[in-house]
Amino acid sequence: MSKPGVFMRLLILNVLAAAILVAGCAPPPPGGGNTIVTASADTGTGDKEPGLADIELCDAEEYRPLIGSNIAAVTLPAGPRMRAFSVDDIVTQEYIPQRTNVLYETDGSIIRVYCG
């Protein structure tokens, strides 16, 4: 027969393991957990003061009018701060806030322009 101390230790370990598993199944916090929460102050005139997520560090705004155009019909500057790629391309996942990304479909139509 086993000693009572060994049984208690095993029981405590099993309870701790169950608590860890249950904690891992908890629902995410409001807002999805990984989203950036920003505050935009209303100036009273209907205009909002930009929050941190509202400020872009790249030139995406300048290139957004190209959405819907064919990638072959546009001229984009070459350099490390501009990247154009297809939905089928393999690209690195590092986030560079100053880089403008131009995403296009396999038929060449630009579908998204964003920072990162």
Image (cartoon, rainbow, N blue to C red):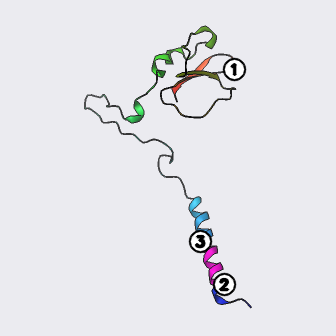
Q: Earlier in the sequence, mark 2 or mark 3?
A: 2
Residue stretch rendered in magenta on the structure: 6-16
Query: What secondary structure is the magenta-colored segment mainly?
Result: helix
Per the rendering, the mark at residue 106 is 1
Of discs 1 and 2, which sits in the foreground?
2
Per the rendering, the mark at residue 85 is none
Label 1: state its secondary structure. Answer: loop
Question: Which residue is pictured at 40% across the width and 31% down the height?
Answer: 54
Q: Amino acid at mark 3?
A: Leu
Q: Amino acid at mark 2?
A: Phe
The picture places residue 14, in percent across and down from the top left corner, at 64, 74
Q: Quadrant of residue 78?
A: top right
The picture places residue 60, in percent across and down from the top left corner, at 48, 22
Q: Which residue is mark 3?
A: 16
The picture places residue 44, in percent across and down from the top left corner, at 25, 32
Magenta span has 87?
A: no
Q: Amino acid at mark 1?
A: Thr
Q: Are marks 2 and 3 in contact (CB under 8 Å)?
A: no
Question: Is 21 positioned to the left or the right of 36 in the image?
Answer: right
Per the rendering, the mark at residue 7 is 2
Inter-mark Cα distance, 1 to 2 = 62 Å
Inter-mark Cα distance, 3 to 1 = 51 Å
